[in-house]
Amino acid sequence: MKKLSNYIENLNFEYAVSYSGLRGDRFKNLEVENKEKIQQIEKELESARFMQKSKLRKKIEVLSDETNLFRARVINKDGELHKSAKKVYKFEKEDKEIELIFRILTSKFEEQYFSMCAPIFRDSIVFYSKKDRIVGILQICFSCWYMKNENEEDLEVDHKIFPILKKKFIQIGHQIEDELKRR
């Protein structure tokens, strides 16, 4: 497990953008659309030739993964945004808001503890180079207080930062509900 403070220390970025997704009407509509598409493909599968079945099953898997809260990501390491994702806030490198977020992220109150729930990463901060290439991604779950980087590596984070970070994200425009009530 990597320390978040080391991760942040080694970031070389020009600007950052926060994204939010996997929630709200956009996600609910996507779930309905994908269920309808899956049902249609399942009907095609019944009469499909042997060589077509693998391709159709793969389509079903992709559509299913897109609305699976435990596997979907707001943004992947290739920079592809989830269909439900939206840009919330852009930070320039010297922006006071990103400096404050870094201070929150690197605060140390006590040892980290591990939640027993599976994380749902609905919020992210993506770090970009001068050439608009992704140099880092923090995937954040405010339900179980968990964080991963762009390589799906768990980050060691003090759990007491999450309420402070959540408040800051709400201030910059993230629509974060009480996630525990939604499960």
Image (spheres, rainbow, N blue to C red):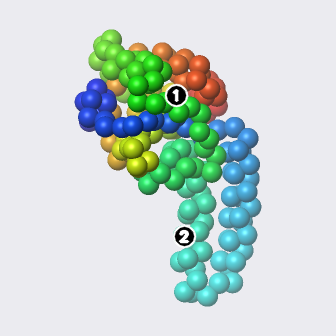
Instruction: Measuring from the top left, give residue 105's x and y in whole percent.
Output: 38, 22
**SS for tag 2?**
helix
**SS for tag 1?**
loop
- Amino acid type of disc 1? Ser
60 up-or-down from 93: above or below: below
Instruction: Measuring from the top left, give residue 180's x and y in whole percent.
Output: 58, 26
Which residue, given by chain and number where applicable, does mark 1 sit on? Answer: 143
Which residue, given by chain and number where applicable, does mark 2 sit on? Answer: 58
> N-terminal of the two: label 2 or label 1?
2
**Which residue: 56% across, 87% down?**
50
- Front-lying residue, 36 or 7: 7
Count of numbered circles in the view: 2
- Front-lying residue, 6 or 42: 6
Q: Residues within 10 Å of mark 2 (few under 14, many from 20)?
A: few
- Amino acid type of disc 2? Lys
Which quadrant of the structure image shows residue 172?
Answer: top right
Quarter of the image with the N terminus is top left
**What distance separates the C-alpha of mark 2 from that of mark 1?**
31 Å
**Which residue: 57% across, 71% down?**
57
